[in-house]
Amino acid sequence: MTAVVDAQVTAPVIAPGASVLADARAQLRTATDVLGFDRSVFDMLATPRREVTVSIPLRRDDGTSEVLIGHRVQHNFSRGPAKGGLRYSPDVTLDEVRALAMWMTWKCALLDVPYGGAKGGVRIDPRDHSQAELERVTRRYTSEISPLIGPERDIPAPDIGTDERTMAWMMDTYSVQQGHTVLGVTTGKPISLGGSLGRATATSRGVAHVAFAALADRGIKVDGATAAVQGFGKVGRYAARFLAEAGMKVVSVSDQYGAIADERGLDVPALEAHVDATGSVVGFPGSDELDGAALLELEVDLLVPAAVEGVLNGGNAERVKAKVIVEGANGPTTPEADEVFRRNDILVAPDILANAGGVVVSYFEWVQSSQAFWWSADEVESRLAARMDIAWRDVNAAARRLDLPLRDAATVLAVERVAQAHLLRGLYP
C-alpha cells in the first residue's frame, strides 16, 4: 500500500525543546533573511516537493509477520535529480526524513553537485533481523517506491543501518522491474556491481579534509593535536583512521554500546580489529571506559560527532570544551548549542560541508555508471579533495564577508544557488 502524505508537521523530540525538522527550517529561515528573500521563497524551499509513505509487510524467518513503515522524501529537483541515503533505524520518523532531505539539497548545492536532496527511511532495528529478512524488507520497500526512483529521478545511497549490500538489493529489484540492469539507480554499491572505488570511505575523507582545514584556521597544528570521535560506524571509524594517520591523537571514541578513552592516543588499527572481532569499541585492551555522553565534553582540539542528530544541544553545550567541532553526522548540533558555541568561540564546521564527501563520490559513481567507464582510487580521492577544498574556501570567504558563523554562511551559499535555479526555471504552469 502506498500513500502520498501532506506536509503537516508532527515534530519528534530529539533534544530538549527542539526537533530536527524545526532546526532545519530555522537554518533555512536565517539564510533567506540574510539573502533578503520574501516569504514565498522560504515556503517553497521549506516544503518538500514530494513525499511517500509505504507499508512494508514482512514475513519473518519463524513464519510470523509484521508490518513496517517506510518513507521517501524528495525535497527539491531544481538543480537535478534527487539524491539521498536510505536509513534503517527504529527512530525513523517522517519529520526526520524531511529534515535530512532538506539538508541533502543544501549539501549538493554547496559542493556544486547537480542534484536535489532526498532521503529515505524504514522504521526497523536491523540488529533484530536476519540478513534474509532485511533483504525482503529492502526489496518490498524498493518495489513500493520504484515509480519515484531512477537514475534521472532519485538515486538512493547507504545511510545508518544500510550498506552496499542493501544498495545491491535495491538496484537488482529496480532492474528486474525495468527488464534490464540499471546500475545508476543507486550509489554506494559493491565494486563488482558498478560501485566506485573510494566510495566507502568518502564521507570520512571529507570530514578529515575539513577537520585539517578548520584546525589550521585556528592555528592548531594537526600533528599531535587531540581528537574525540562520537560514533564508530561508517563515518566515525574511517574518520578516526584518517585523523590518526595524519598524526593526531584520537583519545576517545564511542559507539552505541559505550565509550573508551586513552589520553596517550588510541591505537586505531588495533581498535578496528577489536571492533571487527567483538562488535563494539567497549573492552578495548588498555583503554578506560567512559560514559558515552562524557565524550562530547572532553577537553580536546577536535570533536567529531559522527552518530545521530541533536547530540549537542542546550543541555550540554556549555560543558563542551573542544576548540573545533566538525560534524560527521547530519544535524548533531541544535540551534541552542550553536548559540553557545558562538559565544564560547568554538569553531563549528557544519554537516552540509563537513560530511559532503559521500554525496560527492556518489556523484562520481553515478557518472561512472552512466558512462560505463571506471576511475582509479587515486582519481576519485584527488577529485574529492579538490571539491572539499574549494567548498571550504567558499564557505570561509562567505563567513568573513557576511560576518556569519560557518553554518549560516554555508546555508546561505547553498540556498542562494538552489533559489537561483528555481527562479531561473520559473513556475509551471
Image: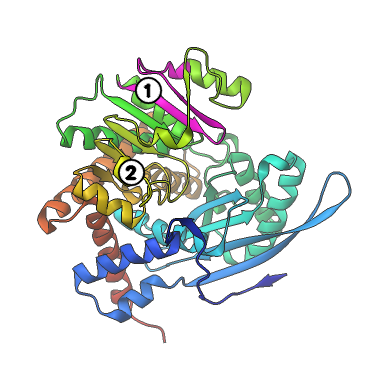
Residue 397 lies left or right of residue 326; in this view the side is left
Residue shown at 40% from the left, 48% from the top = 332
Q: Is residue 267 magenta?
A: yes
State the residue in front, 404 or 191. Answer: 404
Work out whether 107 lies above or below 9.
Answer: above
Q: For the N terminus, which image quadrant? A: bottom right
Say if the magenta span includes residue 19. Answer: no
Q: How many marks?
A: 2
* Residue 140 appears anywhere in the view: yes
| Label 1 with label 2: CB-CB less than 8 Å | no
Q: Secondary structure at mark 1?
A: strand
Q: Position of residue 347 (x, y in %)?
A: 23, 43
Near-viewer residue (172 or 243): 243
Question: Disc 2 marks which residue?
Answer: 354
Q: Position of residue 130 (x, y in %)?
A: 75, 40
Q: Earlier in the sequence, mark 1 or mark 2?
A: 1
Residue tagged 1: 251
Using the rendered image of the protein, determine whether residue 375 is visible from the camera's viewpoint. no
Q: Position of residue 370 (x, y in %)?
A: 49, 50
Q: Is residue 426 left or right of residue 192?
A: left
Snapshot quadrant of residue 20: bottom left
Marks 1 and 2, how far apart in space? 21 Å
User: Considering depth in this image, is 120 or 308 the residue closer to the camera?
Assistant: 308
- Looking at the image, the residue that sits furthest to the top is 286
Segment tinted magenta in the rendering: 248-269
